[in-house]
Image (cartoon, helix red, strand yellow):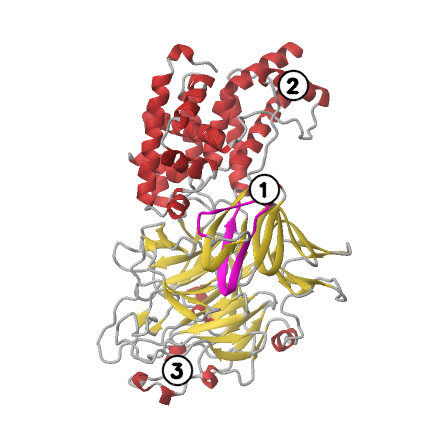
Amino acid sequence: MNRLEELLVRWQDGALTGGELEEFVRLLDAPSARAEMVDDFFMSMTLREILGGAAAPALRVTRRRTFSRAWLLAAAAVIAIAMGVIFLRGERDLATVIRVQGTVRHAGGGTAAVGEEVPVGAGLETLGPASAASLQFPDGTRVDLNGSTRVSRLDGAGGRRIRVEAGRVTVDTGRPLAVETPQGEARVLGTRFTVSVGAGATRLEVNEGKVRLTRRDGKAVDVPRAHFAVAASGVELAAKPLAPKASPGGAFIAAMPPKSWRSVPGARLRHVLPDPAAYPRIGGISNPRGIVQAWSGGALDTLRGRLLIWGGGVNAYQGNEIYAFDVNSLAWERLSDPSPDPADGGQINADGTPNARATYNGLAYVSHADRFFALGGEPARARRATAESADLTWTFDLERKQWRNMNPAGEKPPTYAGNFCSYDPQTNRVWWGETHLSDAGGLYSYDFDSNRWTRHTRERLASYQTCTVDTKRGLLVIVGKGEVIAYDLRRATVARETWKTTGGEKFISSAYPGLDYDPVADRIVGWAGGAVYALDVETKSWTATDAPGAPAPTQYGIFGRWRYVPGLDVFVVVTGIDEEVHFFKGG
Amino acid sequence: MAEGLKNLTARFLAERHALMAFISGLVRDGAAAEDLFQEVWLRLAEAAERGTPVDDLGKWCRGVARNLILHYWRDRREGRIVTDPRVLDLAAKAFDEQEGASRFGAARRQALAECVDGLPAPSQELLRLKYERGLTVEAVAARVKRPYNGIMMGLSRIRRALADCVQKRIRPAEESP
C-alpha cells in the first residue's frame, strides 16, 4: 500500500491529522497522484452504489426555487426519459455503536459491541448504572446512553425518531430529530440536549439551542439553552433555568449583586480531609495544604455542578484523593480515599491508582464521557530526589469513582510540569499544550472515544500559561507569561496565532492564571489575584473589574481552580484548603 | 428553449458520475453529497433559464460544487471532519485534467459490479462494512477484531484486485458515458 493510497483512505474516513493533511496536499502536487485521487473517488462512489444500494446520481425536482416551475418540470421530464426513472433519495437506516462501557445489549437480545449496527426498528439498552453506550448516525448525529437506559427503537427515516423508555440520553445533532418518551416528545433542530425518563416523568435539559417539548396531551413548551422542563401528569409544563434558585447555591448566587465577590461561609476543603491516622504510610510528607498550594489545578464537572480538585505530590503531600465542591449544595465532598500505599516518585501506586501529584493545568472534565481527565504534573516523592515524568493518561469515572490508566494509542505528549489543557465540547477532545523543552513541544489532542492522542503542531510553547476554549468560536485561547495565543480548533490545520491585546498587561504577565470562557457574556475571563479581567475576543481588549472581597491568590498560580459555572452564571475559585470558597459574579 | 434544455440535460447526464465522484469524495457523507449534487443541477437550471452560456459544463458544475462544498464545510464548523480548501482545489484540478468522462462510463461501472461479485466472501464482507455500512477503517477493525493496519492492507489489496479485474474486462472501445 503506497502512502498516497493510505492517506486517501484516511481522508475518506475524516481521520487525517494535521501533519498527514500537509503531506496529502504535498503529494497531490504530482499529476499522477491527482489521477490516483480521481480513480479513488470514483471507485469509492461506485462501490457505495453497488454495495450500499445508494442511488446512482439522479435528479430530484422537489426544491422550491424562483425560476419557472414549468421549466423545471420540463427538465425533469427530459431527465426521466433519459434515465428511465427519477430516483428519490433514501436515508441510510443504520446507526453504528461507537462506544460501549459495561454491559450493553441490543433490544432484541445479544451483547452489543463497538462497530455493530443498530437498524431502524431496533434498540439498545445499557444494563446497570455503570454501563454506557454511544450511537452515531451517518450524518454525524450522536446519541449517548447513560447507565440503566433503554432505547426501545430507532424509528423514522434514518432513525430520526428515538423512543426512550427509561434512563438518560444526550443527543448532539445538526438535523431535525425527535426523542419520544412515555410522557411526551422532544423535537429539535440542531442542538445538544439530555432527556431523562423516570417513573411517570420525562425531564428535558437543553445545553445548546432550543428544543420543543410536547406532552402527550398536546401541550408544548419551547425550552431554551440552560433551561429544563418536565413532562408529567399534574406538573406544570414550563421552561425553568437549570440549577434552580431553590438550591442553596442558586439562592446564594442569586443574592449577589453584579460585579461582586462573595465567600461561602465555612466552605473549607480541610473539613473533608481523611483521618491521617488511617493512612500511616502517607505520613512522611503529609502537608495537605499542598493539595491546592503545590502547583495544583482543578476542573468543573459540568454535569453535576462541582469543582473538582486534585493535587499535592512533589515533596508536599502523598494522598491522591479527589475533592469536589458542589456549587448547588455549597458543600465539600471527598470523592475518593487516598491510596494506602503510595509510590515514592513513581507514577502508579500499589493499588493501581495514579500517584498524587502537582497537577498544574493537566486536568479537565470530559463532559461527553463524564470523565475526569489527568495527565502530567510532578508525582509525590518522599525520599527520592526526583520523580518520574507523569506521562500516563488517566481518567476517573465519576459514577464508579474509579481511576483508569487509559494506555492510549497515537503520538503522546511526554509531559512533565507546566503544561496546559482544556476540553472542547465540539470536538470532544482534550487539547493539550506540551511545553516540554525537547522536540516534543507543541499542540496535541486526546480523543477519549478512540483513546488516541494526535499531535497537531511542532513548536515551542511556554510554561506558566493557562488555556480555555471559546466555545462560540471554537478557539483555544492561552494566556500567561506575557502572551495571548489562540488556535482555531475548527480548522483542519490548527495554527498558532499570537494576539496583541490591550488593557490586560498586568494580568497576562501573571503565571498560571485562572482562565475560563463565559458564554453568556461572551468573554474570556481570568483572575490571578486582585481584579478580574474579561477579554472581548472581537476587539482584543481586556476590561478589569476590581471589586472588593477577592481572596488572596494562591502563591504559585490559580490554574484550573477558577471556573465558570453554567446555569448559575458565576465563577467559582478555590485558593487553599483553609480558605473559604469564593464566587465572582460578572456584570 | 426545448432544444437547449434537451442538449443541456444530455450534457449534464454525461457528466453526472464524474460530478458525483467529485462531490462525494470531498464531502464524505452520502446524503449531503446527494443534496449538493441536486443543488448544482438547480443552479445549472437557473443559469440555463437566464440564458447564461455554459461552455465546459463539467468545469462549470465543479466550480459551483466547489463553492457549495466550502459552504457545507463551514456550516459543519469543520473540526468534526478534516477539511482543507487546498484539497478542494487540487481535486478540482485533478478532475479537470482527466480526459472526458470515459473513465466514469457505464461499461466500467458494470465491470466493477461483476468484479465485486467475483471476490471471495471475506473480501466482499470487508467491502460491505466499509462501503455499504460506511464504517471507518478503525470501526471495521473493531468490528472484525483485526488490527487497523491489517484492514488497511486488506482493503488496498481488494481495491487493486478490482482495478485489475475491471481493466481486463473492458476494452476502451466499449467505454460509454
Q: Which residue is mark 1?
A: A158
Marks 1, 2 in one chain: yes
Residue A124 belongs to the span the image colors magenta: yes
| Boundaries of the magenta span | A113-137
For mark 3, what is the residue? Answer: A289
Label 1 vs 2, first from the N-terminus = 2
Which comes before the other along the chain, label 3 or label 2? Answer: 2
* Mark 2: amino acid: Ala
Judging from the image, mark 1 belongs to the subunit labelled A
- Marks 2 and 3: in contact by CB < 8 Å? no
User: Which is more foreground, mark 1 or mark 2?
Assistant: 1
Q: In the rendered image, which quarter is residue A261 located in?
A: bottom right
Whole-angstrom CA distance, mark 1 to mark 3, is 55 Å
Q: Is residue A499 magenta?
A: no
Closer-to-camera residue (A388/A482): A388
Q: Which residue is mark 2?
A: A75
Q: Residue at x 48, y 50 (%)?
A: A97
Image quarter in which the N terminus of chain A is found: top left
